[in-house]
Image: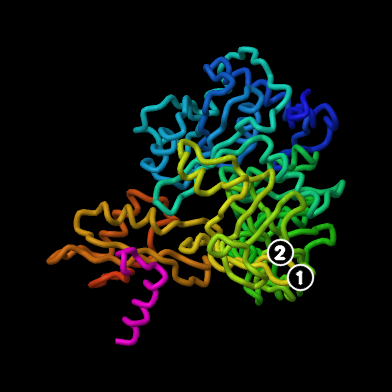
Amino acid sequence: MKSTEIPNWLKQRAFLTPNRIAIKTEYEEISFITLHKNVVRKANQLTFAGIHKGDVVSVLMKNSVEMVEVIHALKYIGAVTVLLNSKLTSNELGFQLTDSGTKMMLTEDALIEKVNEIDIEKVLVKEMEQFPEKECHIQEYFSLDQADTIMYTSGTTGRPKGVIHTYGNHWWSAVGSSLNLGLHQDDCWLLAVPMFHISGLSILYRSVIYGIPAVIHEGFDPKKANAAIMNQGVTIMSIVSVMLSRMLAELGDEKYPDSFRCMLLGGGPAPKPLLEKCMAHNIPVFQTYGMTETASQVVTLAPEYSISKLGSAGKPLFPVQIKIEKEGKPAKPNEIGEIVVKGPSVTKGYLNRIDATKTSIVDGWLYTGDIGYLDDEGFLFVMDRRSDLIISGGENIYPAELEAVLLAHPKILEAGVTGIEDAKWGQVPAAFVRKEEGSHITEAEIIAFCYENLARFKVPKSIYFVDRLPRNASNKLLRRKLIELLKDENND
């Protein structure tokens, strides 16, 4: 083994602690050695199907034991895995499959309709069980610089970009998290966020690297999440505010066992009433900041600072450096500027996007586009997520992507999208449109058009017809001023 290599995670874990539990579901528990054997079989079946080392394979699945096995099986072969968001439309999926150069897509019955019209080889994972096995050459070691996964994140230009994650990115993310949160022998992580998101995938990887169980839920259900904490030994859970609020409402007057030690909260700062409610229930909340480009969290706030540093995402993880730049120069404490991050978990770049990579990553420093400041003690405060980013229930929504869809409608001349506050989701997208003169297009028609071209969570919740959109001297749309149009309307 070279100094730039690490052992195959699951294979090594199955050798070191074969009888430890790797996965828990509502119905079964699977040991690491059993998981390893199941993965070898799937790797052999995928080899029979024609997958080789270096091939790009897309996975369109919901959280399940089968999805876990498929992800590891592709590692055993040495293929590059594209994690597809199951909420996307056929058009959105088609772009990502083409852009990534996918050779084969693995999916399931519940999602096959989304990709029926796409001209690409598709394999249903259940049908794969009937395939013969062709022995694959198992990848014994992972090179830290080797591409492992690709996840698409929407950019400010409206076209999603494929973030390349190396094995080193994922490895150091797991190491940084353990140095921050600690690692207890009885730890158990609840995975109720999608594995096609970096938050979900990172939990899966940590469980194998640490040798702890992951409790897999297909989706988020507050009752089932609380039950897992109460009855299945869960000690850590990754979550966003809207999920946490629903769990607290479901919990009522009950309290979690003392063994539960960390609610890792991402997706933007938590409101003070929510944090106070958690304190009353003795729930330790660790607020955190990260993104797809950093392979999960890079800054985390310990619970003892949750009130005194209200609104802060915390301090950088051990292997991470962070700074604030303003007009190309280091900002002073409490001075607002762009958040810039460096560390071994930062992506090496975007797939097929040389210009975007050169713009975003300079000398290893990732220019996040997010705005914030560091206080006198080095705590990070995030002011704006990529300035115009809308965070709705933990999902990132980029206005430019929605605007591009709206402008594709023949009766819409101009479009602007911004986030408006929402009690349940934190924010929801609202669209401001200038329609063609004499057109009688309705809000319902526009929303129906959006549903055909956008994932449900991205569709604007309201459409406002306006005579003009706010723009600057160079005719650039000023999204931050869109909300003022609502105020003007209310004052009329």
Q: Could you tell which of marks 2 and 1 lies nearer the N-terminus?
A: 1
Report the coloring of the rendering.
Answer: rainbow
**What segment is highlighted magenta in the picture?**
473-492
Residue 218 location in percent, x, y? 60, 46
Asked whether 337 or 162 is in front, the reply is: 337
For image coordinates 57% across by 66% down, the residue present is 337
Secondary element type, mark 2: strand
Q: Nearer the viewer, residue 27 or 428?
A: 428
Q: Is disc 2 surrounded by few (<14), some (14 to 19) or many (20+) residues within 10 Å?
A: many
Q: Amino acid at mark 1?
A: Tyr
Q: Which quarter of the image is occupied by the N terminus?
A: top right
Specify the principal SS of the magenta part.
helix
Local crowd size for mark 1, using a 10 Å CA cut-off: few (<14), some (14–19), many (≥20): some
Pointer 2 with pointer 1, Cβ within 8 A: yes
Give x and y (percent) for residue 492. Answer: 29, 87
Find the residue positioned furthest to the front: 329
Q: Mark number for residue 294? A: none
- Give the residue at x 14% y 66%: 437
> Where residue 311 appears, x then y in whole percent?
65, 71
Q: Badge 1 is on which residue?
A: 305
- State the residue position of label 2: 314
Residue type highlighted by circle 2: Gly
Instruction: Tell me, yes or no, if residue 26 can be seen here.
Output: no
